[in-house]
Image (cartoon, rainbow, N blue to C red):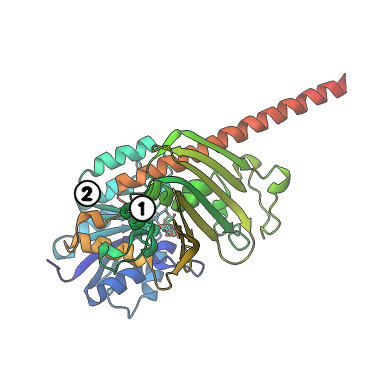
Amino acid sequence: MVSQPFNVLLLGAGAVNFGTPEGPWCHTTRLERKLGARLNVVGLVDPVTSKAEARLAEKRGVVGYEHTEVFGSIAAAGEALTGTRAPALVVAGVQPEIRGSHAPGRDVELQVQRAFPSTPLFVEKPLSSSPVAEVVAVAAALGGTRTSVGYMFRYLEGLCGGWAGLTPAVQTIRRLIAEHGLQVTATVAQYYMAYEHAGTPERHAGYFDLGVEVGPIVSQATHIVDLCVYLAGPADLASVHTHTLEVDEGPGVLSKLGWSSDIPTARHIPRVTTAVWKYATGAVATLVHGVSLHDGDYETELVVLADGWKFKLVDPYGVPRLHVRRPGQPEEAVTVYKDDDPFFTEMATFIDVIEGVVDESAVLSTYNEAIRTYELTWAIRNDGDKNRDERRARAAQANGKSASNGAA
Ligand SMILES: NC(=O)c1ccc[n+]([C@@H]2O[C@H](COP(=O)([O-])OP(=O)(O)OC[C@H]3O[C@@H](n4cnc5c(N)ncnc54)[C@H](O)[C@@H]3O)[C@@H](O)[C@H]2O)c1
């Protein structure tokens, strides 16, 4: 039964909830489109309340924000938003460092649960920056709470066949795999970031600093790794092998960084990461992530192989294209999805699940499901870090030897 109005509590007055010029994300515009006059944003929580007020001021005149109250904490929102003001949905668009843990201040999900028990929770990727075990403990604490995690690419029409199965039959990777009883044999994923405009010391430089953020695999390539897991199943974590190109190695210099970095060498993100692993099925995977393009858009691409078949998803962030080569048809068929907005489908689907319009299974990434991706991205990063440290130790030892040889 669809209720009126639909109360939403937003956590975070930042980019993912309110948008930025450099990306398509912006949860508020998708909520506005989905709910129209029914949208009632009851609260916006951000410890930087001045930022929250500024974002709300930009929404003046937009339907849905007439009664929005700004709160400095989730607890304060919990005290105020009761009865008819209680949220039907909480959208956690906050940084991973304050999520996915029981540690005070890093426990946003649990704060939400205390303030609004059982209220459905949309939470952004990556699940956290904490160790996997802590995230697993949070999942257990969330229990039966409905969750949806921001892996929006799962909702691309070319991948899942459309929102809740309501769109016309689209030739998609998931559907073709199911229809033809295919077994994925390999995935080849590429994620090339355009870094030239990605950071200034004041803004987003944390991306380049492992002391501030979790690094490009856990925070960024996570999207394409998630698709690998979605299409080929769970990975054998013990099989992961990773190599990285680092800032202190010859080709690791970035000529267009645009700001002078004082990040210590040990804390610089890798410039390029390559990883291979096996899936539980026996299939194999390759990932290449590069902080490597200058201006313009990111480039992402995923190839999925099965006996006789090749699927290639190109540019999921932009205008997604799906290339399919199949038995008996060596020419690739290309489908272009011009108006596919996975951010919208992701949010609209969760609202429909909450309102009982569609079945729970329409949520394509729950908190529990997202843990698989989280642990795989950490396995990739950890193996890369280990190999980097061993390489540096070998180099230091060799330098020591040659210095002492020189002295002798
Ligand atoms: N799915 C996507 O494509 C996509 C795109 C962008 C960002 N994200 C993810 O969204 C998350 C947020 O990223 P962002 O770029 O919006 O970050 P941001 O820094 O722009 O915004 C986060 C906001 O949360 C606020 N905040 C801090 N503690 C809080 C608390 N306890 N309660 C409420 N608000 C609090 C901060 O003050 C800040 O305003 C990250 O996990 C990021 O990876 C996902």
Q: Which residue is mark 2?
A: 145
Q: How many C-alpha atoms fall within 10 Å of the one at disc 2: few (<14), some, or many (≥20)?
A: some
Q: Secondary structure at mark 1?
A: helix
Figure check: 245 above or below 173? above
In this image, 172 relative to 286: left or right?
left
Depth-wise, is mark 2 or mark 1 nearer the camera?
Answer: 1
Which residue occupies the extreme top position in the image?
408
Q: Please tell me the numbered disc located at residue 230.
A: none
Figure check: 199 above or below 64? above
Residue 337 seen in this snapshot: yes
Q: How many C-alpha atoms fall within 10 Å of the one at disc 1: few (<14), some, or many (≥20)?
A: some
In this image, 127 relative to 384: left or right?
left
Residue 102 seen in this snapshot: no
Residue at 52%, 45% in the rendered image: 286
Residue at 24%, 70% in the rendered image: 40
The answer to which quarter of the image holds residue 403 is top right
In this image, 267 relative to 54: left or right?
right
Q: Where residue 351 sits: x, y (%)?
A: 24, 63
Which residue occupies the extreme left position in the image?
1
Q: Secondary structure at mark 2?
A: loop
Residue at 36%, 43% in the rendered image: 371
Q: Which residue is mark 1?
A: 177
Quadrant in the picture for the C terminus: top right
Q: Where residue 147 sits: x, y (%)?
A: 27, 52
Whether pointer 2 and pointer 1 mark residues with C-beta atoms closer than 8 Å, the reply is no
